Image (cartoon, rainbow, N blue to C red):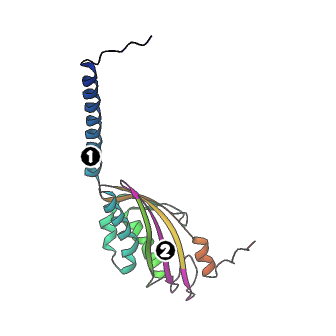
Amino acid sequence: MFRRRSRGKSRPAIALAVAGTVAAGSAAAVALRRRTRATGAPAADAERIVKRLLEEPWKGNFDVIDECVAPGYVGHDPAEAEPIRGPAGVRANFDKYVAAFPGGAVTVDDQISEHENVATRWTGRGIHSGEIAGIAPTGKEVTVTGLTISKLEGGKIVEEWTTWDTLGMLVQLGAVPEPARA
């Protein structure tokens, strides 16, 4: 009924072929990882670059914008009518908020990254001491939270998508009434 097959030389040959295939696959994966890292910043460096851009302009270091932002940068922020373009656009956006909240700060709360994509959860705090969006200074303390997803290439940020609590800021400033609670 069942016949025992010979355990001849074919089994070691199959094992050797499988081992060779696994080794080749592992080598290819390592090479691909090295190539990915060589073309841009490792994930930890990408996180550091994004953190610097979010926090340092609030401390007066605007040079970080030219260091971290690519010339072809595009920033998407629903609070803005048009995309933010290039380092000059990033500088103008920071200038607007730093003038409205001098002494304010953005703190990076958490970051998650994969290759050169970084998701950053942040909190901004400041006292409204300058005009913003047509709202005269109120002297009120404001706290907002946001999330920015950054795409880097060659160690510079090339594109970002930001969403933050714009309505919460307007409510805290008294520019719009607090939404009704259920």
Q: Quadrant of the N terminus?
A: top left
Image quadrant assignment for residue 91 = bottom left
**Residue type for callout 2:** Thr
Q: Please determine whether, in this image, residue 139 is positioned above or below residue 109.
A: below
Give the residue displayed 46% in from the left and 76% down from the top.
96
Give me the disc on residue 35: 1
Q: CA distance from mark 1 to mark 2?
A: 35 Å
Give me the disc on residue 182: none
Q: Earlier in the sequence, mark 1 or mark 2?
A: 1
**Residue type for callout 1:** Arg
Give the residue displayed 57% in from the left and 87% down from the top.
138
Q: Is residue 75 left or right of residue 15?
A: right
Residue 112 position, x and y percent, is 42, 61
Please tell me whether mark 2 sits on a helix, a strand or a loop: strand
Q: Quadrant of the C terminus?
A: bottom right
Q: Please determine whether, in this image, residue 17 is positioned above or below residue 1.
A: below
Please tell me how many numbered marks the rendered image carries: 2
Residue 86 position, x and y percent, is 38, 62
Image quadrant assignment for residue 156 = bottom left
Residue 170 position, x and y percent, is 61, 76
Is the residue marked by circle 1 packed among few (<14), some (14-19), or many (20+) residues within 10 Å? few
Q: Is residue 131 left or right of residue 182?
A: left
Give the residue displayed 24% in from the left and 28% down from the top.
16
Q: Nearer the viewer, residue 25 or 182?
A: 25
The residue that label 2 is drawn on is 123
Confirm whether the magenta stretch covers residue 117: yes
Q: Is residue 131 left or right of residue 111?
A: right
Give the residue displayed 58% in from the left and 81% down from the top.
135
Q: Which residues are magenta?
A: 113-142
Is the residue marked by circle 2 packed among few (<14), some (14-19), or many (20+) residues within 10 Å? some
Q: Nearer the viewer, residue 180 or 137?
A: 180
Please tell me whether mark 1 sits on a helix, a strand or a loop: helix
